[in-house]
Structure formats: structure tokens, C-alpha cells
Amino acid sequence: MPRDLQPLAGVRVLDATSNIAGPFGAAVLADLGAQVTKLESPLADPSRSMVPLDGDRSAYFHIVNRNKTAITTDFKSLQGRAVFDQLLSESDVFLTNFLPDRLNALSLSPADLMAANPRLIYGNLTSYGAAGADASHPGYDATVQARTGVMYVTGESEGDPVRTGVSILDIGSGMWLAIGILAAIVERNESGLGCLIETSLYETGISWVSYHLTAYQLSEMPSVRSGTGHPTFAPYGNFPTLNGQICVGVGNDEIFAKFANAVGGRQWITDPRFAKNSGRVANKIELHALIISALSTADAKYWVTQLGKVGVPCDLVVPPEALFQDPQQLAVGMLLANPDLESKVKLIPGIPVTFNGKRPQITKSAPHRNI
């Protein structure tokens, strides 16, 4: 890739993480040009076997390990440790998601490695954080969604709490890990010293429920599930049409007036129940019934077009695979070619960042097992 698409060119990263969150953070660094070497145990990264499979790789493995090379390393063997020590001496960044007891048992703790390598940037991603009684407690995306309340506020108002449809704590924690590493690289350029960067699924979950924590302090009302809607705005969320569903976002009174005019509900604008957002939230059941009736006269594509023309945020509710043919996706170029022509996976989402209008490409497919 051109140098302007590789701002981290020359940065060497040892990625000893596994599963999803840590490897995704390392993949972000790799996309930005870092030379990332994945250190894989003889038992293999569990994400290799997460269905659907593509030989010795999987859908998840392709996503979170692109642009990396891989070697198999047994930290418990003398030979494996010698290989690791040599690689570490040549590296700028070391990433791990081992539990504290394992780090100490393998002499891989921050104190062990940074004392001998003062320029080393050490990235540690855990489930529940580096301190407290639960620091050694194992966790996955769903279990930590449960602990932090993300799961509690997800789902229909009368239904049970559900896991979000994407692994937001895994992907989000990987992003925070990458952001922390980037900041540490900038600092090291000034001070010459490395830094310990720590994040966790738990801390990410707390960050994601920021609104709910703040709203509770103001209202003293317990958090609720709102389905596709939102406790702050109305109308907001999914609505059925003659054929298909649309998602509408009305964030203020001006947009509501545009929406009402477009769907034939001009009288709603002066209705004291609906004129202001606070009233629309309080009377959303009555308002939604009127909207559903109005939208039943035409199909989803018609309403998306008409509402878009007048500046109302609105779009079709579609499955992820619709993105393969979405003209907007084709225009922004988010789906990049997988360089492994023998793989069934032909397109992989790149990072959602461009540099001077260009997106960093995937130059290496996720590595096969190297035993």
C-alpha cells in the first residue's frame, strides 16, 4: 500500500490475544500498516472453530486476523520462550488477553516484560478489568453485556433482555485497545518510554450505557427496554408499511413537522399531545398507532424516498447481506477484496476510516495454522 495509507508502517506488534476482542484490536493496527505477528498456542485460537468454517479458518477468524502473519508458540517450552523473547526484543507493542494468574505463571506480566524493555508498549485486554475481586473472572461478550446492563436495555419493552445482534463489547473493546496503543505510540515518540495500556469488556460496557446511567441520576427512574425505539425521542424506531419495515428517527420538533406533513398527518403538528417532543414521548402509543395507519398506504421504498426528500432520517430495515448490493456501500467502498483467492470469503469489511479519500486495503488474508 502507499505510505499515506500505512501510518503505522515500521511499528512491530506481537499479538498474543485470542478469540475476538484482542485480535480485532490488533487487526485495526495491522490495517493501519503495523507489522503484526500473531502468536498462537499449539491448541489453536478458539475463533478458528467458530462456525461457519472455511477450512482451518472461520468467518470470525477472517475478520479479526486479516493483515497478520502467524506463528505457533508454546510459552511453556524453552524453545518457544526463546522464540518469543527474540521477537519481543524486536517489537514495539505486545498485546495479551491472558488472565492475571496465567500471565504471572508464564512470566509475561507487565512488570516482567517492561522492566527489560522500557520502550515496550504493553496492551492488556481482559473481561472485567485489571483491579478488583473480579479481575480474574472469565467472561464473554454476552455475559458482560448482562453484567453491565447492556443486555437489560436491549429488546422489546414487554419482552426479555436479549444480547445485541453484534458483539459490541468484543469489537468495542478491541477498538479501545487500538486507540490506547495509538496514544501510547504518540507519547513514546516524545518520552522514549513505553506504557501499559489496559481495557476490558466490562469498562466498555459501562461506557456504552453512559446515557442510562446519567438519565437515572436525573430522573431516578429505572432503565427500560425500548425495542427499536428510544426513551428520549418519538417517533423513533421501526414501523410497518404496506410492504416491509422502515426505521424513522425524529430527533426534534422541526423534523416532526416535516414527517407529519409527508405522511399526511399535518394536524399532528398542532395537536397538544404531539406538538412537542416531551408530549410525543408521553403519548407515543397513540402517536404510533396513527403513524402505522398512515404508512400502510404505500410500501417501504416509497416512504424512504419521500421522507428522505424532506430531510427526515429514515431507511429500510434489511439484513446485513443486503450490503453486498447496496449502492451506497459500493460508493464508499467498505467491502474490500480478500487476497486469498482460494477462500470462499471474497469480501471483508475494512476499517471505517479513509486517508485523503482512500481506505487502507487488506493485503494479507487471515493466516492458516502454522504448526
Image (cartoon, rainbow, N blue to C red):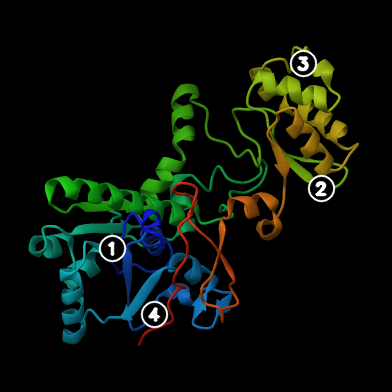
Q: Secondary structure at mark 3?
A: helix
| Mark linked to residue 44 | 4
Query: Quadrant location of residue 125?
Result: bottom left
Q: Secondary structure at mark 2?
A: loop
Amino acid of disc 4: Ala
Residue name at image x 62 percent, y 49 percent? 160
| Mark linked to residue 269 | 3
Residue farthest along the left direction in this orientation: 116
Number of numbered tags placed on the structure image: 4
In-image side of 114 versus 46 (left or right) = left
Amino acid of disc 1: Leu
Disc 1, disc 4: CB below 8 Å? no
Q: Which residue is mark 2?
A: 244
Q: Secondary structure at mark 1?
A: strand
Q: Looking at the picture, does residue 367 appear above or below residue 223?
A: below
Residue name at image x 70 percent, y 28 percent? 311
| Mark linked to residue 95 | 1
Query: Quadrant location of residue 263?
Result: top right
Residue name at image x 75 percent, y 27 percent? 310
Q: CA distance from mark 3 to mark 2?
A: 26 Å
Disc 3, disc 2: CB below 8 Å? no
